[in-house]
Structure formats: structure tokens, C-alpha cells
Image (spheres, helix red, strand yellow):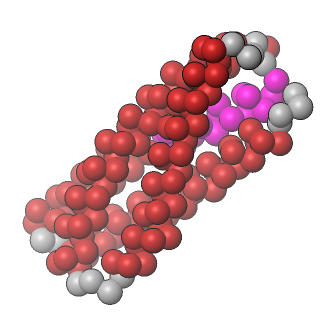
Amino acid sequence: MTKAIEAALFLHLIGVAVWIGGMVFAHFCLRPALGDLAPQLRLPLWEAVFARFFNWVAGAVIVILLSGGFLLMQFGGGHAAWPLHAMAGLGIVMMLIFGHIRFAVFPRIRRAVQAQNWPDGARAVATVRRLVVVNLVLGIVTIGTAVLSRGF
């Protein structure tokens, strides 16, 4: 394995760790801890957390795309083994879901917090939660594909 491939794989895995790890933390640790807070406290906190986390995810997505594209080219491009294409496809779906969360759902949260419209904000946060669960499942399947495809 060349140093360039090793560096790309390292960056790729760091990006995945930031994204998947952040979703695990937000869904399984932060969300339950905020459950007892009143919407007037909970929703502005979610807005602040998402604003910061989505910047990290955007950076991770760029790193994952660049490193993943480089790695795919190194391992055959269009002729690479099917698990590499599966990982790329799953990753693209995850990125599209993130884009929807960031550019369609998050602005609804921000508007609801600014207007102090707690029911609309709660619905938007619930949408994020459902989409994060979908992305977590896709991320776990993608990681499983990477691990189980080592022989290809």
C-alpha cells in the first residue's frame, strides 16, 4: 500500500468517525439528556448544536468525498470490486440525506426558534432525528460492507 493510499484511507476514516460518531452522540446521548428540558430551552440548544455539528459534517463530507474518490480510482475506478461501489453509493445517499437535513430541515428549526414557534421547531427536530437514524443505519451498513469486503 502506497503512502498516498494510506494517507487517503486515514483521512477517509477520520471523516467517517467524525460523522458517524457525532450522530451516535447526538442520538443516543444528547437527545435523551435534553428530553426533560422545556421546548423554550431545548430547541435553541438543538439549533446551536446543529449549527456547529453540521459544519463539522460538511467538512467530513468533503474529506470523505475526496479521499473516497481517490481510493476508488486507486482500486480500479469503474472496474473496482462491487463492495467499493456499494460503499460509494451508500455514502452518496447519506450525503444527500445530510444535504436535505442541512439545507431544508435545519432552516425550519432556525426559523421556529427565532419565532419562538416551539411546536414547529419540535416537528423539525423530530424530522432530523428520523433522518439521523436512517443515516446511522446506512453508515453501519457501509462500515460493515468495508469490513466484510476485505477479501475482494
- Number of numbered discs overlaid on the protein picture: 0
> Which residue sits at x=38%, y=78%?
33
Main SS class of the magenta portion in the image: helix
Q: Nearer the viewer, residue 76 or 122?
A: 76
Q: Nearer the viewer, residue 115 or 72?
A: 72
Q: Establish if 98 lies above or below 120.
A: above
Q: Residue furthest left?
A: 115
Q: Establish if 98 lies above or below 134.
A: above
The stretch in magenta equals: 81-97
Quadrant containing the N terminus in the rendered view:
top right
> Which residue sits at x=83%, y=42%?
148
Q: Residue furthest front?
A: 3
The location of residue 137, given as percent across then percent down, is 63, 56
Q: Is residue 31 left or right of residue 66?
A: left
Q: Establish if 71 lies above or below 132.
A: above
**Can residue 52 be seen in this snapshot?**
yes
| Residue 130 lies in the magenta-colored region | no
> Which residue sits at x=46%, y=63%?
25
